[in-house]
Amino acid sequence: MNLLPFGVALWLFVVGLYGIVTSRNLLHQIISLSVVQASTYVLLLAVGYRTGGAAPVFADIPTSRATVDPIVQALTLTDVVVGATVSALLLAVAVQIHKRTGTLDPENLRRRPES
Amino acid sequence: MTIRVRRVVFLIGVGLLAVMLARSVGALPHFGAYRGPYGDVVSRASVSERHITDVVTAVNFDFRGFDTLGEEFIFFAAVLGVALILRPQTDEGVGHVIDCATGRAVPPTSDAVRVLGLGLTPPTVLFGIYVVVHGHLTPGGGFQGGVILATGVLLIYLAGEFDDLHGLYSDSALERAEAVGAAGFIGLGLLGVIAGSVFLDNVLPLGRTGSVFSAGMVPLINLSVGLEIAAGLVLLLTTFLRQTIVLRRIESPARRP
């Protein structure tokens, strides 16, 4: 039984959370969130994997050939798009925060009475 | 809460979480022993009933098309949100357009980067169009191809200056292209309703499997999504680049009430 892909997903999830919780820089936090999201890609693709399965593209293989699950791959595509949009929005907020307060450190943000 | 306290609380919580996740992973089917029937059912159905050879595209743009419509509008809303958050503020104006990082002037683009960037732009754009158009045959589709198209445009910025890039298009043209892409998806979905079926039903002729002009509405939806993603991403890039390159604060940073 090969647990490595699930272990990788779990590790990415946990290590990304650690980055979010302890980071002192908003950009680093956003990248940590991307790492958490990457764990979901790994998990989805691992769940749908079939040993010896081909890619679910029947342009050059017969339809009788066993393939990996196309549904989780489609879900991963949705996941990637959502991840990219979340990152874009958060980065925009980070740009504005830096312009307004001159800092990207969440600790300093909290101590500012005017912000 | 200090960093130290927060770290201890986090470690306790994440330890519990890791134990639970590890237990649930143990209950999953073994890696490589995928046994769900749905993937196989969809694989057979997409080729025989929809003439689509890339099953991932079949799932996204046909069987699950309505969800992809929502996904596209997530992207649409995010681009709107970024444009709104990063709109020029009242105390900002258009400064001298110059690449600079923290007051340090950036050296001019080297000839090698210039030649490579401009040389790579046409093949990248062509490849993007190829990926969009062949989404129903081989891996690809509107989302992937749209990102590649936007990369081609970004290469122009890398090879030159922001003004070169921004001289190519206006923001309103991009916004229109994005809106047309988003509306195109809905319009294609309404074709199903007009034909007397349901929203997003694949009502166009399916054609010969393996041909570019096959799979009914899927290539058209891919084109529409590709247009929206490419325009939206270029709009995002332009918005972010304008923040660092064009916009400058006019007055001294005022304390806002």
Image (cartoon, coloured by chain):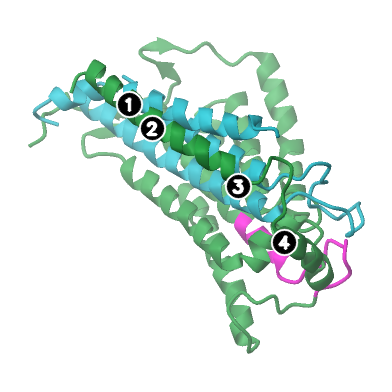
Q: Are marks 2 and 3 in contact (CB under 8 Å)?
A: no
> Which numbered disc, 1 or 3, marks the residue closer to the eye?
1
Task: Name which residue lies at 42% across and 17% down.
Answer: B100
Is A17 above or below relative to B142?
above
Pointer 3 residue? A76
Which segment did they paint magenta?
B206-225
Q: Colour of chain A?
A: cyan
Residue labelled with disc 2: B16
Please tell me if label 4 and label 1 are on a single chain.
Answer: yes
Direction from residue B237 to residue A62 in the image, left or right: right
Q: Are marks 4 and 3 in contact (CB under 8 Å)?
A: no
Where residue B12 is drawn, which disc sits there? 1
Q: Can you give x and y, in whole percent of width and height, for residue B236 in the image?
A: 47, 41
Q: Secondary structure at mark 1?
A: helix
Q: Are marks 1 and 2 in contact (CB under 8 Å)?
A: yes
Q: Residue at x 76, y 42 (%)?
A: B127
Residue B222 painted magenta: yes
Report the amino acid beneath label 4.
Answer: Pro
Chain letter behind tag 3 = A
Give the dominant element type of the magenta stretch: helix, strand or loop. Answer: loop
CA neighbours of label 4 inside 10 A, class few (<14), some (14 to 19), many (20+): few
Residue appearing at x 67%, y 61% in the figure? B59
> Which subunit holds the residue at mark 2?
B
Q: Check the residue under mark 4 and report the chain it is in.
A: B
